[in-house]
Image (cartoon, rainbow, N blue to C red):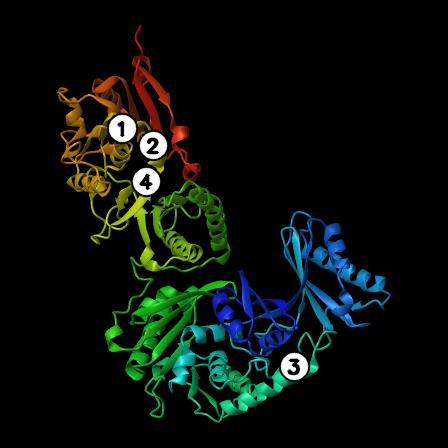
Amino acid sequence: MLSKHVFFVTCPKGVEYLLADELESFGLAQVRNAPAGIWVEGELEAGYRACLWSRLANRVILHIAEVDARSADELYEGVVGLDWQAHVPAGGSFRVTFLGQNEAIRNTQFGAQKVKDGIVDSIRGAGSPRPSVAQKDPDVTISARLNRGRLSVGLDLSGHSLHMRGYRTEQGLAPLKENLAAALLLRAGWPDIAAAGGDFVDPMCGSGTLVIEAALMALDIAPGRKQERFGFDKWPGHQPELWMGLRQEAERRAHEGKQRRIPVFAGFDQDGRVIDTARKNIQRAGLDGIVQVDVRSISQFQRDPAWAEQGLVLTNPPYGERLSERKELAGLYQKLGEVVLRELSGWRLGLFTGAPEFGKSVGLRSFKQYNLFNGKLPAQLLLFEVHPDNARVPRDPDAAGGVMPRIANPERAAMLRNRLKKNLKTIGQWARKQGIDCYRLYDADMPEYALAIDLYEGRVHVQEYAAPKSIDDKAARERWAEALAVIAEVLETKPENMVCKQRQRQSGTRQYEKQAASGEYFNVREHGCVLKVNLKDYLDTGLFLDHRPVRHWIQQHARGKRFLNLFCYTGAATVHAAVGGASRSLSLDMSKTYVSWAQDNLSLNGVDLRKHVVEQADCLSWLADRKTANQTFDLIFMDPPTFSNSARMAGVLDIQRDHGTMVRKCMERLSSDGLLIFSNNFRKFKLDEDLEAEFEVKEVTASTLDKDFQRNQKIHRCWHIQHKLTD
């Protein structure tokens, strides 16, 4: 029985799932995923096959062992205890690549040195000659990866990054790595298109990487076929006969691939210098006479009558990193859309870009978007079916009013990315343990990104706090676009599941105005209650997340009580009271929309609307009226707006000025042993000192802020107010 080995195969970020499928086709079973790599298990032959045939991998590392490495000494002892004679040739040379750090090992150079010391001392201790260390052209390369207190060591079978096929010694101005090009082709469906008789065109081909990789893939040519050296050539465990058989198989398949129908492989670029480079690359790849490239601009693009009725147009256009270039992008992308629609209807278009907002300028509806990275730069592959039915009006994202996701400052964006990942780990973990599905992930944690990001059971609600006048409008738009790109990436959310708004101070009737008219309501759950929310149509969503602990407290203390909810909004607090066993309730709000919404929320929870009544009323006027029968309550919740001058109100509400009167009127309707919960979100609010003399007043704000609002402890203030006990 052939022995099984464990391998760690690395790849570009975002390509992991494609790589897993490819490795499975080589006979390697997936063990687990890792960032920018896959752990797999299989026979040595499958590892060799990955070195020769993987179009996606960077390196194939044969796992040797994992040792404790909580300290430098522990790392050394773990390494020195391994059998290095089985991996480093006698009297040969090696080098160590080291990644990772922990509290004891903060420097990769130091970590690599400790591994080298361990290997050398292990071999010398076994009575063998001391191996030499060679940074250039070593016999073998040892890979060491430190993760917390464990060090994984392995042998780099590839010996070099497998994206380097050997045909590209020169490159254009914006090189696309070969394995990323292969990933784009796979995502775009090129293997199926080629098998169905389709052709391939890159109208902005640069040095020809995409068109060459398309040809290698369609003709079944191994990407490692031209490589003369691999990292296992001088490895003591190497099996030359096994490797020779795989090389011969690759030659046979390359020959057979050229005997079948050969698709058209055409590349064009307006820069004659990069076309010269592309021709040299094509020659080195052994594709002379198969891949054709020519100097031609987009405006000169024409379909050749010999091309098939179906095919793939895949290109990597300029990203517009310079402002002068960016101004031209909308026109370039629009022209691309026009020519493919005119010349190549029935084909598929794939656009790989670091400026995905310009996809709107193509004038076609994209049916698929994949988030990837070009090096460290976030990018997207946009796919379009080229057909008149999919045409749309082209749009310039730099035009007034349009903000699309785009990262202009990678270092600044990385700060936001890291903060969101940290919050996901801490707040997200807390929320899962508490059974909370709707929570605030981020609230202006960083001054560069003044946003509130809320999660609603898989949907994302993003509010941008309006920038002060001192901030340049263009800079603010740039950061907003940057945030949209990072949020979508970190949360792995689809555009249709992310709603973005700009939040400004609302007053009067504006606080009730619709922002849109989608009618897209959906239900969420909170502490056993079902609540209806709408992320799109109003400034707020129908659920104030910061009041979650207040609502839960009400639910836990409402049994048998008469409940009053003033300024009830969508009635969420009333739902919690009713679910908690309140005997009856009255909820008041002056908005007809919110009254209806509150009734819907109560109905969703099976609440009897005869006992739990919602009415449209001006709360100020209602409180000012003389108390009538059945207007005594055991539990009152009052959370008024800071300011309102709605036409539906008899007067103007100013919370700082009017709260004393409102509280006293509430207390007239509160039973002798009842409780008023008074809350508001006016940051400069000061409680009327006379209230503390008249009633038992206790501020409970700290206990009403869950973990997701600990950063913003001024989100609201809250008091418990009761009648004073009499002797």
Residue type at mark 3?
Answer: Trp
Residue type at mark 1?
Answer: Phe
Mark 1: secondary structure:
strand
Closer to the chain start, of discs 4 and 3, is: 3
> From the viewer's perspective, is residue 483 above or below residue 469?
below
Residue at the (38%, 65%) spot, across then down? 356
Look at discs 1 and 4 and give the one toward the viewer.
4
Residue at the (44%, 76%) spot, across then down? 185
Closer to the chain start, of discs 2 and 4, is: 4
- Label 1 – label 2 distance at C-alpha: 9 Å
In the depicted view, which residue is nearer to us: 317 or 320?
317
Identify residue for label 2: 550
Identify residue for label 3: 243
Mark 2: secondary structure:
helix
Identify residue for label 4: 528
Residue type at mark 2?
Answer: Val
Identify residue for label 1: 637
- Image location (x, y in percent) of residue 369: 38, 66
Which residue ends up furthest to the right in the rendered image?
127
For label 3, the crowd category at 10 Å Cα-Cα, with few meaning under 14, some 14 to 19 and many 20 or more, is some
Which quadrant of the figure has residue 88?
bottom right
Which quadrant of the figure has residue 668?
top left
